[in-house]
Image: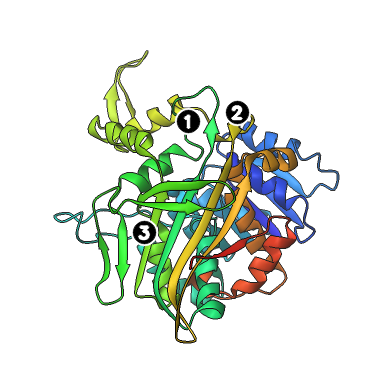
Amino acid sequence: MRVLLVGAGGVGTAVTRIAARRDFLTQMVVADYDPARAEAAVAALGDQEGRFSARRLDASDAAAVGRVLREERCDVLLNATDPRFVLPLFDAALAAGTHYVDMAMSLSAPHATAPYEQCGVKLGDEQFARSADWERTGRLALVGMGVEPGLSDVFARYAADELFDEIEEIGVRDGSNLTVEGYDFAPSFNIWTTIEECLNPPVVYEKDRGWFTTAPFSEPEVFDFPEGIGPVECVNVEHEEVLLIPRWVDARRVTFKYGLGDDFIAKLKTLHELGLDATAKVRVPGADGPVGVAPRDVVAACLPDPATLGDRMKGKTCAGTWVRGTRNGAPREVYLYHVVDNEWSMREYGSQAVVWQTAVNPVIALELLANGTWKGAGVLGPEALPPRPFLDLLTAYESPWGLREQR
């Protein structure tokens, strides 16, 4: 398989380190707007076989991306950029006739008059609107194939296929006990994306109501995470699983809740109150006159790069899917989960736990596509494909998943 990887940040670099250990990959072109990042990711591999190469590429330039896909004879484009670049990369892959895999989906837009009650443009709407175009080409756009969304969706499909007869509720629950030495505020994942998903109206799905929204950080609950992480307060956050799971899995209710903590929530609220979460550019003085900058980009530039924090991080991160329903007429409740210890991921891969956990899942998906185990055409989420081969391969990557009976 020949892959164009766009984005050589923390997740993209972790993708290269994981993929380098697998033999399904013929060639991976690592592309980034900053060529030094792409070159550093490739150089760190010590690639003796010449399977990895680096080049500069602007993810917003669909025509340029298409040219690289054709020049490099790529089978698939793997998008490891932030969600702003989903659509140009998605369109470039479609035009070039290649498959496409991303770890998020196209951005949402709040409802104009009732943002905390009704959905406006939902996550992924603009991609699913093009599904027929992908079907006609016989190519697959696999969207939301990270850890959350991604592995969490695979868990949902596995639960529906093998663990339950009827499902009352599917709730993705994410929490950690990670700390970063020397920083009062150092998010372990891309802050641009974190602000986007945490401050947008969260989406909830109910079978007899459809998709609707609530206020940010609503419905707090304490969830007890496994493997020593323990109880963490989780709140509703906008996330792709709620938009994906109901398309292929029959459940009466679907939610996503993230363990943020009071201090993190307070800082996000302050950013919002000051307008520092905005993506529209404002004019500020510059050495050569006024320049336009997006406040959110300034916040991101002022914070440490999450990819560089691994040596200062301690603890574990957990991604998982809680499912409640019935099996053989009796109530059942389980939590399917995947835990990564930062000490392990740093020792084995040199990548901090959160970015490694995100990166391993699209690499597994690529391997399943390469060997023909996963196949399809159109725009699909992970829950549209067989879950067992994915979970077996996750274990083969020396990163097993777990299942905890809740009652």
Residue 369 in view, yes or no = no
Would you say 122 lies left or right of 312 here? left
In which quarter of the view is residue 323 placed? bottom left
Percent across and percent down for residue 406 are 49, 65
Marks 2 and 1 sit apart, C-alpha to C-alpha, by 10 Å
- Residue kind at label 1, given as amino acid type: Ala
N-term-proximal mark, 2 vs 1: 1
Residue at the right extreme? 48
N-term-proximal mark, 2 vs 3: 3
The correct choice, above or below, for 341 with respect to 92 in the image is above
Under circle 2, the secondary element is helix
Residue at the front extreme? 407
Q: Residue at label 2?
A: 312
Q: Are marks 2 and 3 in contact (CB under 8 Å)?
A: no
Q: Residue at x 30, y 48 (%)?
A: 217
Marks 2 and 3 sit apart, C-alpha to C-alpha, by 33 Å
- Residue kind at label 3, given as amino acid type: Leu
The correct choice, above or below, for 184 with respect to 330 in the image is above
Neighbour tally class for label 3: few under 14, some 14-19, many 20 plus, Cα within 10 Å? many
Q: Are marks 3 and 1 in contact (CB under 8 Å)?
A: no
Q: Residue at label 3?
A: 123
Q: Which of label 3 and label 1 is nearer to you? A: 1
Residue at the bottom extreme? 328
Q: Residue at label 1?
A: 186
Residue 253 in view, yes or no = yes
